């Protein structure tokens, strides 16, 4: 048999009832198998991800704990060294450092500075290091005003050319007065502090990274695809989880890596050094074993399907031999070659099938004609109404928009079906599509307000209301109405803003601030996310109002509001409580970080001035700082602690920051 003839026979076999039954059986089997494999893949991915996230949590806790212990041991060693050089003349400090030779197992080098930031001794001795001025460095400025040890940002060593960090502790004399620093240098390139991390294996592509709280990379294994040491984290993919980790959060998440690959990540804080540990494994590596297993399962099921098809083909051929003629006539009716079946056979069952088919075909043709008439009437009604209306079928496809709606939305008469959805504002599109799918599945009314991008560049607010149309208890489709509510939405937005903001400064008012504090307290109770409240009022503000008038006082309030809003983070909330009282809410912030922010606010506001009649006025801040803690069941208790601390700051002479510690003690900040 020639090839074209064989192709024709194969085509007829596929188009036959027998072929369709076999094809349906095969498709049903493939769909079932595909759905089972798909569900196994979907549920399996979640289980695999959860198991590996738990593993990452354990690994990151071990790594962070080990690094924290190493940092604390080194800092304690430096504290003991500081006690050994306390009140020792500068000429003898080098000898004391030489006696501490054993510390070079931990440090690249040791150094001691005086109270003015000048290096007075180092070991091993590096030419040019003695006498070096460190006053302008960030670590000396931090230690001069802080009694706690400090780990510096990475820098390049002058002698080795390697990347280093300094671990420093402050020096004090017997009277407790700051007398300089004692520091040890850690070699990030060749030192042993991160040596254990190089040996950790997390599959082929998993790796461990260590960052500073400012985002600088301290360590990453050589096998990981990264650029040179010290690169800023901002150059990588900026995800919410990374930013949260820099703000003090620790936990696990699934996010995209620099290359856009979904990756399982765990973050832990190394508090003694203010570092961050990141443990990452690509999601493809985690899910590869599951994919291999399902692939083998697929081939096993495919072999079983082929065996079943061979068996069913033999059975169907024997059962359907009398129906081939009926199948051909039905195909002719479907192709329009005949209107009804004309089957002459002695088989009563086949005559019944043919008669039932002819009746149904007659009813279908009559219903189709009636439907055309109703469609023409509906088109006339919708085309003449001034209200924007549309019609959609049961699958959700919008197949008609009346002229009023086309004009409202700026769509052409020959628009594509997808144009409607593409003109919806991106922020509203996903929710609108989800609600529309829910309406299609349940038949419930679709009511939603959304933004629509007009071709003229204007963003319209519209209200869409669609309902299901029933005919003989069967749904026929959906009819919807669209109204322009742009002006109403703008008025509502303005009223909401005015209800929660201070008209003088533009900051939140008491009502708006209390709502955000309640949200922060609820989040703390639910997830333990730390937040800090700062309350303060303006010292020496009354003379400005009394001597310069309320206009001058209002100007001072506006300037203070601008400075405070500029100094805090974008995620923080600033409010004017009333009069000269202000409040700041710092979400996801530790008490130590909040104290630093409060000090920067105090310094910045002290530089604000206003002038009147040749006289210059300035103010200071009396600030109270408290964090959310266990047992806070209402915002009033948080306000009370911060208010008490603020009164204490004013009682201590003003221009001060008072922090409430966890044991309710008040800690005065330097001023």
Image (cartoon, rainbow, N blue to C red):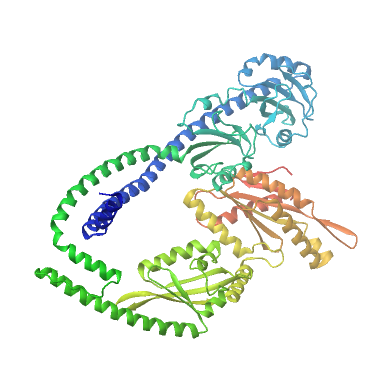
User: Which quadrant of the view contains residue 82?
Assistant: top right
User: Which quadrant of the view contains residue 399?
Assistant: bottom left
Q: Is residue 216 left or right of residue 36?
A: right
Is residue 484 visible to the viewer in this orientation of the structure?
no
User: Which quadrant of the view contains residue 484?
Assistant: bottom right
Residue visible at 23% across and 54% down in the picture: 22
Q: Nearer the viewer, residue 189 or 411?
A: 411
Q: Nearer the viewer, residue 266 or 406?
A: 406
Q: Nearer the viewer, residue 415 or 498?
A: 415
Q: How many marks?
A: 0
Q: Is residue 199 left or right of residue 585?
A: left
* Residue that protrudes farthest toward the right in the picture: 614
Query: Compared with residue 314, is residue 144 higher up or lower down, i.e. above or below?
Result: above
Query: Compared with residue 620, is residue 268 higher up or lower down, i.e. above or below?
Result: above
Residue 116, position in %: x, y? 79, 30
- Quarter of the image that includes the C terminus: top right
Is residue 388 visible to the viewer in this orientation of the structure?
yes
Residue 192, position in %: x, y? 58, 22
Residue visible at 16% across and 51% down in the picture: 314
């Amino acid at each position: 048999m020639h090839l074209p003839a064989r192709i024709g026979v194969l085509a007829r076999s596929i188009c036959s009832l027998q072929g369709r039954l076999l094809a349906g059986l095969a498709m049903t089997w493939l769909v079932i198998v595909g759905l089972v494999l798909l569900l196994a893949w979907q549920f399996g991915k979640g289980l695999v991800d959860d198991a590996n996230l738990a593993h990452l949590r354990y690994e990151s806790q071990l790594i962070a704990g080990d690094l924290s212990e190493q940092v604390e041991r080194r800092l304690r060693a430096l504290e003991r060294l500081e006690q050994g050089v306390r009140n020792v003349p500068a000429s003898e400090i080098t000898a004391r450092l030489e006696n501490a030779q054993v510390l070079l197992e931990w440090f690249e080098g040791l150094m001691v500075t005086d109270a003015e930031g000048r290096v007075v001794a180092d070991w091993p001795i590096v030419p040019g290091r003695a006498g070096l001025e460190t006053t302008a460095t960030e670590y000396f400025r931090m230690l001069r005003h802080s009694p706690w040890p400090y780990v510096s940002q990475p820098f390049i060593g002058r002698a080795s050319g390697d990347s280093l960090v300094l671990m420093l502790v402050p020096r004090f004399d017997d009277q407790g007065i700051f007398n300089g620093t004692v520091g040890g240098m850690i070699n990030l390139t060749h030192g042993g502090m991160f040596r254990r991390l190089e040996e950790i294996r997390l599959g082929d592509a998993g790796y461990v990274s260590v960052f500073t709280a400012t985002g600088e990379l301290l360590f990453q294994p050589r096998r990981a695809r990264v650029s040179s040491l010290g690169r800023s984290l901002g150059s990588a993919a900026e995800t919410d989880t990374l930013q949260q980790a820099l703000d003090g959060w620790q936990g696990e998440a699934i996010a995209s890596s620099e290359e856009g690959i979904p990756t399982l990540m765990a973050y832990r804080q190394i508090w003694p050094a203010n570092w961050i540990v990141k443990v990452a494994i690509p999601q493809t590596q985690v899910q590869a074993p599951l994919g291999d297993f399902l692939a083998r399962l697929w081939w096993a099921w495919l072999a079983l399907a082929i065996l079943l098809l061979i068996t069913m083909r033999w059975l169907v051929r024997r059962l359907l031999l009398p129906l081939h003629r009926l199948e051909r006539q039905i195909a002719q009716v479907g192709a329009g070659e005949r209107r009804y079946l004309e089957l002459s056979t002695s088989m009563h069952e086949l005559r019944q099938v043919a008669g039932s088919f002819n009746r149904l075909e007659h009813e279908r043709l009559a219903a189709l004609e009636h439907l055309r008439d109703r469609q023409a009437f509906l088109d006339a009604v919708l085309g003449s109404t001034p209200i924007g209306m549309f019609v959609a079928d049961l699958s959700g496809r919008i197949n008609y928009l009346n002229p009023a709606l086309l004009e409202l939305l700026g769509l052409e008469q020959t628009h594509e079906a997808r144009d409607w959805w593409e003109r919806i504002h991106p922020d509203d599109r996903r929710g609108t599509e989800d609600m529309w799918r829910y309406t299609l599945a349940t038949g419930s009314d679709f009511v939603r307000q959304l933004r629509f991008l007009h071709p003229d560049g204007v963003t319209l607010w519209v209200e869409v209301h669609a309902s299901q149309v029933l005919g003989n208890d069967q749904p026929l489709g959906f009819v919807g109405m669209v109204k322009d509510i742009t002006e109403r939405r703008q008025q509502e937005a303005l009223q909401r803003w005015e209800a929660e903001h201070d008209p003088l400064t533009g900051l939140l008012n008491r009502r708006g601030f209390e709502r955000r504090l309640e949200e922060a307290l609820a989040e703390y109770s639910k997830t333990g996310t730390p937040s800090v409240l700062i309350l303060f009022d303006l010292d020496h503000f009354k003379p400005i109002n009394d001597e310069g008038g309320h206009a001058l006082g209002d100007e001072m309030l506006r300037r203070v509001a601008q400075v405070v809003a500029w100094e805090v983070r974008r995620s923080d909330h600033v409010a004017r409580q009333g009069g000269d009282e202000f409040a700041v809410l710092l979400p996801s912030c530790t008490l130590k970080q909040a104290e630093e922010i409060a000090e920067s606010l105090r310094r910045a506001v002290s530089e604000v001035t206003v002038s009147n009649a040749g006289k210059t006025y300035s103010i200071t801040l009396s600030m109270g700082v408290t964090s959310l803690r266990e047992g806070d069941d209402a915002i009033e208790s948080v306000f009370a602690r911060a208010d008490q601390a603020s009164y204490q700051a004013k009682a201590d002479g003003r221009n001060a920051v008072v922090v409430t510690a966890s044991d309710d003690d008040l800690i005065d900040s330097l001023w």
